[in-house]
Amino acid sequence: MRVVLAEDLFLLRDGLTRTLEEHGFDVVAAVDNAPELLRALHEERPDVAVVDIRLPPDFTDEGLRAALQARREQPGLPVLILSQYVEQLYAQELLAGGEGAVGYLLKDRVTHTAQFVDAVRTVAGGGTVLDPQVVARLLARSDARGTTSALTPREHDVLKLMAEGRSNAAITQALHISESAVAKHTASIFAKLRIDPSPDANRRVLAVLAYLRR
């Protein structure tokens, strides 16, 4: 699996590269600035990009903007964001396509190698991985606009775990309920958010988007 990595700190970039290579990934480019990231994404066409938000030259949001630009030019390009911050606007824009293959992890909350490697594999495979703290910030923002009024507390719990990229089996374990109950809650969430079945859309991602936007 081919990876493009963007991280401005040498020691962290080197450590991430070694970790990925030790777990069978091929890091085809490891860069430290946004222009080089764009060049690498265009030239290498990787299976997944692992990107820090704040890169030279300005250390604001160059990394994420470069990843979003590349994703517009290469629809479905898997992107895993690593950051110290929750950038709400860009997190929503990253999810806006609804097709998955996106992730957003906070650096100081990645506590072991398996967590990071699993996230890269999930995103590369078309899944969605969001740090629980990112989810909490985004849901809190939408709660302030009264967007959760139609959902029951249990449906809220299910949707939050869904947004973290959990499978139905994982939600079952986290909430100590049956898989059939999870399926029932999920169906109810889709119905309340008016998300109809479609062969072209990931309903779980669209549910999170609808929840954040309404």
Image (spheres, rainbow, N blue to C red):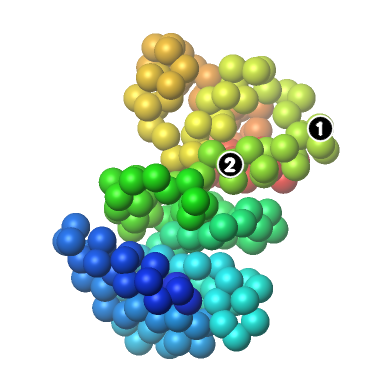
Question: What residue is shown at x 60% (from left), y 85% (from top)?
Answer: 57
Question: What residue is shown at x 26% (from left), y 73% (from top)?
Answer: 27
Local SS, label 1: loop
Question: What residue is shown at x 39% (from left), y 67% (from top)?
Answer: 12
The C terminus, quarter of image? top right
Local SS, label 2: helix
Q: Amino acid at mark 1?
A: Gly
Residue 105 lies left or right of residue 10; in this view the side is right
Residue 52 lies left or right of residue 13; in this view the side is right
Residue at the extreme right of the image, as rendered: 145
Residue 41 visible to the viewer: no
Q: Position of residue 88 (x, y in %)?
A: 68, 54
- Tell me the CA gap for discs 2 and 1: 20 Å
Compared with residue 206, is residue 158 higher up or lower down, i.e. above or below? above
Compared with residue 142, is residue 23 higher up or lower down, i.e. above or below? below
Q: Which mark is residue 146?
A: 1
Contact check, label 2 and label 1, Cβ < 8 Å: no
Q: Which of the two discs, 2 and 1, labels the residue nearer the N terminus?
A: 2
Structural crowding at the residue carrying mark 1, measured as other residues with C-alpha within 10 Å and reported as few (<14), some (14–19) or many (≥20): few
Structural crowding at the residue carrying mark 2, measured as other residues with C-alpha within 10 Å and reported as few (<14), some (14–19) or many (≥20): some
Residue pointed to by mark 2:
133
Question: 93 or 180: nearer the eye?
Answer: 93
